[in-house]
Image: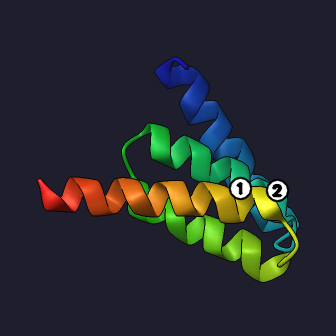
Amino acid sequence: MQIKDLSFSLDFYNRSIVVNPSYYKAYYSLSKILNDQGNIGDAINNLKKAIEINSDYDKAYILRFHRELELIYYNSL
């Protein structure tokens, strides 16, 4: 994704969350963008929020697991 697209998407999902803070899919999508920008910690926090809102959202659990493994790996270097 190009920087302009990431910026637009980041803004879009942040606005979506402001309009509807219980829209768990916005947090999930935002986490993917943040991860692409190298913000793994913020990505994990958004996945945790998605899970907090909808504890049945399996995709968020799976992606959080992967992001936490990435964080452990990068911290061990």
The answer to the question of whether label 2 and label 1 lie on touching residues, with beta carbons closer than 8 A, is yes
Q: Residue at x 52, y 65 (%)?
A: 44
- The type of colouring in the image is rainbow
Judged from the image, the secondary structure of the residue bearing numbered disc 2 is: helix
Q: Residue at x 68, y 75 (%)?
A: 49
Q: Residue at x 50, y 48 (%)?
A: 34
| Number of marks in the rendered image | 2
Task: Give x and y (percent) for residue 26.
Answer: 77, 55
Q: Which residue is mark 2?
A: 25
Q: Residues within 10 Å of mark 1 (few under 14, many from 20)?
A: many
Q: Which residue is mark 1?
A: 28
Task: Give x and y (percent) for residue 59.
Answer: 76, 55
Looking at the rendered structure, the kind of residue marked 1 is: Tyr
Please state if 7 lies on the left or on the right of 21 as rendered: left
Judged from the image, the secondary structure of the residue bearing numbered disc 1 is: helix
Looking at the rendered structure, the kind of residue marked 2 is: Lys
Vertical placement of residue 32 versus 15, above or below: above
